[in-house]
């Protein structure tokens, strides 16, 4: 006959609390990162919750700094309007915010976008941590390199799109006939949507060389394939540059196409060097055949 001690009774509530709060911790995988389907779903829930909490926190902080963030969003328009007024002082330009809820919606959208960008190291790490258990040691190193290079490249592309945007706006608004009393009205929410599309497109485009190199590392893409598609890729970059900005002017087009061309060539060189090294390592020679047993 067994008797429950006071110590066992005291531990029971502690175990129950641990069970109820177990969803706050990521499940641990077995050897080699193996997990059951239920554990994978639990880990996915954990990663999503952590990412959402980080985004909510950063968005809440950004919501407090609403005015300076609006100034950052409106900088391309102010630069474009100053350029237009310098050439045509009689031009009529005006920014409007239509609707009773439009100011609050604008504030909320800006805060969410800034929060998403500010929390990118956290949700990118959660994405990497979710994928890592299923990767071998060599592939884990590739994932780390992918994250280390993708974040600065994305930010560089986004900054380039942000810098190019005033030139595109200026060129488009310059089509307004002079001396006819026409006023250009700019809706704030529509302008924010346009700016986000341009910035995100430039940022995502700058991830192209990283994706190409990673595909080559895992054996999906060869340097010879990149060389064969080079001229079509360069042509595609200029087509993308023509449609990626609101103006389609040569300056904005080349601002995206030329960096992408250079990065494509650099990625091709890296892939060629990796393929050459792989061929040397995979000559089919078994090193065990040359081992000498001295026992």
Image (tube, helix red, strand yellow):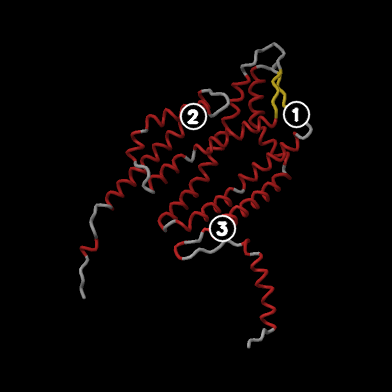
For label 2, count other residues whose C-alpha is less than 10 Å away and answer few (under 14), some (14-19) or many (20+).
some
* Camera-side residue of 188 and 72: 188
Query: What is the x, y in percent for residue 120?
Result: 58, 48
For label 1, count other residues whose C-alpha is less than 10 Å away and answer few (under 14), some (14-19) or many (20+).
few
Relative to 246, residue 109 above or below: below
| Residue denoted by label 2 | 240
Q: Residue placed farthest to the bottom in the image? A: 1
Q: Who's the residue at 60% across and 21% down the image?
A: 172
Relative to 19, residue 53 above or below: above
- Residue 169, quarter of the rendered image: top right
Q: Secondary structure at mark 2?
A: helix
- Tally the numbered discs: 3
* Camera-side residue of 281 and 101: 101
- Marks 2 and 1, how far apart at CA: 32 Å
Q: Who's the residue at 68% across and 39% down the image?
A: 110
Q: Residue placed farthest to the right in the image? A: 100
Could you say which disc has been placed on residue 98 in the image?
1
Query: What is the x, y in percent for residue 107?
Result: 72, 39
| Residue denoted by label 3 | 43
């Amino acid at each position: 006959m067994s008797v429950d001690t006071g110590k066992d009774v005291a531990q029971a509530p502690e175990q129950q609390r641990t069970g109820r709060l177990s969803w706050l911790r990521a499940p641990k995988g077995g050897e080699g990162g193996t997990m059951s389907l239920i554990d994978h779903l639990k880990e996915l829930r954990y990663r999503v919750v952590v990412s959402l909490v980080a985004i909510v926190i950063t968005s809440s902080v950004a919501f407090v700094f609403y005015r300076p963030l609006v100034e950052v969003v409106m900088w391309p328009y102010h630069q474009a309007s100053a350029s237009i007024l310098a050439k045509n002082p009689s031009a009529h330009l005006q920014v409007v915010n239509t609707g009773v809820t439009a100011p609050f919606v604008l504030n909320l959208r800006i805060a969410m976008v800034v929060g998403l960008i500010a929390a990118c190291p956290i949700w990118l790490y959660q994405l990497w941590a979710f994928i890592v258990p299923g990767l071998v040691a060599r592939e884990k190193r590739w994932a780390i390199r992918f994250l280390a290079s993708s974040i600065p490249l994305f930010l560089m592309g986004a900054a380039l799109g942000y810098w190019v945007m005033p030139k595109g706006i200026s060129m488009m608004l310059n089509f307004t006939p002079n001396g006819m009393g026409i006023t250009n009205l700019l809706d704030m929410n529509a302008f924010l949507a346009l700016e986000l599309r341009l910035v995100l497109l430039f940022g995502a485009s700058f991830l192209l060389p990283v994706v190409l190199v990673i595909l080559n590392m895992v054996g999906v893409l060869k340097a010879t394939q990149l060389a064969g598609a080079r001229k079509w890729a360069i042509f595609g970059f200029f087509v993308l540059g023509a449609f990626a900005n609101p103006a389609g002017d040569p300056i904005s087009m080349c601002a995206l196409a030329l960096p992408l061309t250079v990065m494509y060539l650099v990625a091709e060189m890296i892939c060629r060097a990796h393929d050459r090294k792989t061929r040397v390592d995979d000559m089919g020679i078994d090193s065990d055949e040359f081992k000498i047993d001295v026992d």
